[in-house]
Amino acid sequence: MKTSSVPLSSTAEKAIDAAIGATIDPWPPATSKRQAILNAAADVFAEQGFAGASIDAIAVRAGVSRQTVYNQVGDKDNLFKIVVGEITERSSAGFFKVLDTFPVAPTDLEEELAVFSAQLLRKAVCDPNGRWLRKLVETEGARFPALFETWKEYGPGKKYPAVAARLAQLALGGYLEVDDPALAARQYMALLATDLRIDQQFGRVTPEAEIDRMAADATRTFLRAFASRK
Amino acid sequence: MKTSSVPLSSTAEKAIDAAIGATIDPWPPATSKRQAILNAAADVFAEQGFAGASIDAIAVRAGVSRQTVYNQVGDKDNLFKIVVGEITERSSAGFFKVLDTFPVAPTDLEEELAVFSAQLLRKAVCDPNGRWLRKLVETEGARFPALFETWKEYGPGKKYPAVAARLAQLALGGYLEVDDPALAARQYMALLATDLRIDQQFGRVTPEAEIDRMAADATRTFLRAFASRK
DNA sequence: GACGAATTGGACAATTGTGTCCAAAATATT
DNA sequence: AATATTTTGGACACAATTGTCCAATTCGTC
């Protein structure tokens, strides 16, 4: 029923925080209200959809008066745009941070790819940012075409090619036999995400250990199909 | 923007039609209004979500007065339940109808499995019934717990085991090397659905020929991982 | 053509939500 | 401590929606 909240913070505000220097309280009071609003809005939009989310509900959950919501973000459309924009940024950043640890020159391919896969699962598929983004885009994409375009560009549009590039690198290194890196990337991601998606559809909270198992299963099957037969 | 409509018909009404015998018009006037309402409701719920769907919009799209909607189905909650119930039934029926054509004793495994896979893609993943059901359950599952349970039971809860059973059969027949049929079933479905899901997320209408290609790609990779090394 | 049932459209009250205005209070800044 | 800024909460107009009621009309049936 109640979903855990995702902390949001705009790059602008992070820049300000950095400029001010180390603050005891990570969020200065002036922006903490805004943060509370954006966090609450993310929750309520995800739970109720755009039409079902009322400004009142958002204000209450943020522990803020309704007027403050309007002061901070303008109207409902704008609030929605801001929330999705920030989640998009976070989700994308998290993904590429993990992708940087991809084992491009492994000694034990299966072992290292499984470890990487588990991380990717945790940070990209399991991560509330990405889940809510997918859900919101699916639900409200038609209502906000511009947002839909942004998501496409930041989401699948950049992620799949990036994964494909790593797989191509492994192929060049003689680790894999891959004709079509783009296809292999989609299949790898599909194998990786399937069990977690099923759990999520069922509303089941996946135990940590299971994530490692899922990554290992996906990696094993992927390598059975694509590993170089030495 | 506009989604194509899915014809709905309850089993009860089909039974009645059958009892009456062959009618020229497949839908007697008394039920045709009801059908129009359910079809329209399916569209509008899918497009706007539960909260965003207004009875007026549904009535207009059904070409029916608002009062008739209330006469036929009672209130909005009930309308929603009826629609989801019927879509669940259709979606499940379509899936198992295709599953009956699974090649349990193939002469050319790759060829026959690819053909079957293409059919499954067309009828189960591509099919509007299943898509809207997934979307509605994801969006409104929290609001209608009973519905969520029904979907779980009819949907993944029965489909995956059914696929797993066929794969186990192939393994027994010496066609496949499968340790864990349930896992293999999930992975097979994941490989099969990934490209179509991506297209759907991007709002792209997948050309018929591409579906065959997707099925072939998925089948090839699946068999590279699981086919018996003769 | 006459009867009965379903449909229509319009009006209605009640509710809910949006977005604005404003004066009082709380909070930061100097 | 004085001042500027933000926040608050309440009131408000306006629009959309739900669900009901009912008389007039249309429609299928006999």
Image (cartoon, coloured by chain):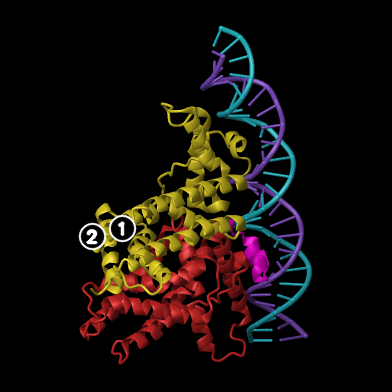
Chain colours: A red, B yellow, C cyan, D purple
Residue A145, how many percent across, how many down?
A: 41, 58
**Relative horizontal placement of residue B106, taking residue A33 as reference (left or right):** left
| Position of B83 relative to B187 (above/below) | above
| Position of B21 relative to A136 (above/below) | above
Between marks 2 and 1, how big is the CA–CA gap?
Answer: 9 Å
Give the extent of the magenta segment. A52-66
The amino acid on which the numbered mark 2 sits, given as a three-letter code, is Thr
The amino acid on which the numbered mark 1 sits, given as a three-letter code, is Pro
Q: Chain of mark 2?
A: B
Which SS does the magenta portion mostly show? helix
- Quadrant hosting residue A222: bottom left
Instruction: Report the residue that reaches farthest toward the front.
Output: B173
**Relative horizontal placement of residue B198, taking residue B34 as reference (left or right):** left
Q: Chain of mark 1?
A: B
Asked if the residues shown at circle 2 and circle 1 are in contact, with their CB atoms under 8 angstroms apart, the answer is no
Residue A211, how many percent across, how many down?
A: 47, 79
Count numbered badges in the picture.
2
Point out which mark residue B131 bears: none
Q: Dot 2: what SS? A: loop
Residue A50 lies in magenta, yes or no?
no
Q: Nearer the viewer, residue A38 or A182?
A: A182
Q: Nearer the viewer, residue A18 or B121?
A: B121
Residue B53, how many percent across, how many down?
A: 54, 48
Residue A61 lies in magenta, yes or no?
yes
**Residue at numbered disc 1:** B103
Evaluate whether residue A84 shows in this view: no
**Residue at numbered disc 2:** B107
Evaluate whether residue A91 shows in this view: yes
| Quadrant where the image shows the C terminus of chain A | bottom left
Q: Nearer the viewer, residue A219 or A152?
A: A219
